[in-house]
């Protein structure tokens, strides 16, 4: 008798076991479905992470920009640090001269940064307006200590636009809107101050904001006034009055206008209006 025990047809038992094992492995096969699912999950996680890093980059970098501009915050020894920022234009304007929603003002600058304005202020609590907004409403928040970032939509797009939005979104006493016909890519306004720039990464943007937003040292007329939305029937940030690109007509109110009858009534969140001429 030959060494070893044989199975059917003389096949050694060890060979039979090996054949069975090979057959089982063949039947199980490679788990391609699981592998594909894992690869898809990893790829999705990587794409989400990449998207987050790209989209959040302006916001994450904004903290560094604000820290770099911190030396421009006002203090008793340096009440208006914007005087140290190259390119800032400053001009004195009397406050609290209001016009009616149907009236226009012949502003002396474009965009304007002071002068008569609508009694209803544009919401300035971190709002990024997607469309141009009426000048007379946008000037009023400047009287409350807000900063308005205007930009030329033909020149500022993509990453540059996101850099500007990072300075505004969700931040009190800040607002932003496109401005048709702007002669520079970017223009910053506070009451009595303006700075026009070419680049969204210019550090002077953050210096201007640090120096002038709610500066308490008399650089704007109505300290402590509100920036909150007034709502439908007054000023609705979801449906603001549109920008009028036409040249103001002969009935437009001049820069020394003292206010229209019925437009100077005091409103919640607004400092009391002074009589005309005071």
Image: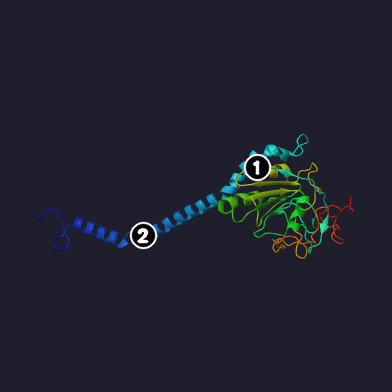
| Residue 122 visible in this rendered orientation of the protein | no
Q: CA distance from mark 1 to mark 2?
A: 56 Å
- Residue receiving disc 1: 204
Q: Residue furthest front?
A: 250
Task: Give the quarter of the figure containing the N terminus.
Answer: bottom left
Q: Residue 210 appears in which quarter of the rendering? A: top right
| Up/down of 216 relative to 154, above or below | above
Q: Is residue 266 left or right of residue 14?
A: right
Coordinates of residue 189 in the picture (x, y in percent): 71, 49
Coordinates of residue 105 in the picture (x, y in percent): 78, 58
Q: Residue at x 69, y 37 (%)?
A: 71
Q: Residue at x 50, y 51 (%)?
A: 50
How crowded pointer 2 is (Cα within 10 Å; few <14, some 14-19, many 20+) is rated as: few
| Residue 189 visible in this rendered orientation of the protein | yes
How crowded pointer 1 is (Cα within 10 Å; few <14, some 14-19, many 20+) is rated as: many
- Residue receiving disc 2: 32
The answer to which of 126 and 201 lies nearer the viewer is 201
Callout 2: SS: helix
Coordinates of residue 146 in the picture (x, y in percent): 74, 50
The answer to which of 89 and 85 lies nearer the viewer is 89
Q: Are marks 1 and 2 in contact (CB under 8 Å)?
A: no
The circle on residue 190 is none
């Amino acid at each position: 008798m030959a060494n070893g025990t044989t199975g059917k047809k003389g096949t050694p038992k060890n060979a039979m076991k090996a054949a069975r094992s090979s057959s089982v492995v063949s039947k199980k096969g490679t788990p391609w479905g699981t592998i594909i699912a894992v690869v898809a999950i990893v790829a999705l996680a990587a794409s989400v992470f990449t998207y987050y890093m790209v989209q959040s980059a302006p916001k994450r970098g904004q903290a560094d920009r604000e820290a770099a501009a911190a030396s421009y915050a006002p203090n008793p020894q340096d009440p208006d640090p914007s005087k140290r920022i190259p390119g800032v234009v400053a001009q004195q304007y009397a406050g609290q001269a209001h016009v009616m929603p149907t009236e226009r003002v012949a502003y002396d600058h474009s965009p304007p940064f002071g002068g008569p304005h609508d009694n209803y202020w544009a919401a300035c609590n971190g709002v990024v307006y997607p469309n141009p907004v009426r000048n007379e409403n946008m000037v009023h928040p400047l009287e409350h200590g807000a900063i308005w970032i205007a930009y030329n939509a033909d020149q500022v797009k993509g990453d540059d636009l996101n850099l500007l939005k990072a300075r505004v979104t969700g931040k009190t006493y800040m607002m932003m809107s496109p401005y048709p016909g702007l002669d520079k890519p970017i223009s910053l306004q506070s009451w009595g101050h303006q700075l026009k720039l070419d680049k969204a990464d210019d550090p002077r943007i953050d210096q201007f904001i640090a120096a002038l937003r709610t500066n308490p040292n008399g650089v704007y007329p109505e300290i402590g006034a509100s920036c909150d939305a007034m709502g439908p029937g007054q000023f609705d940030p979801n449906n603001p009055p549109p920008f009028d690109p036409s040249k103001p007509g002969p009935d437009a109110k001049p820069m020394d206008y003292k206010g229209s009858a019925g437009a100077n009534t005091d409103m919640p969140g607004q400092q009391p209006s002074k009589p005309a001429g005071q």
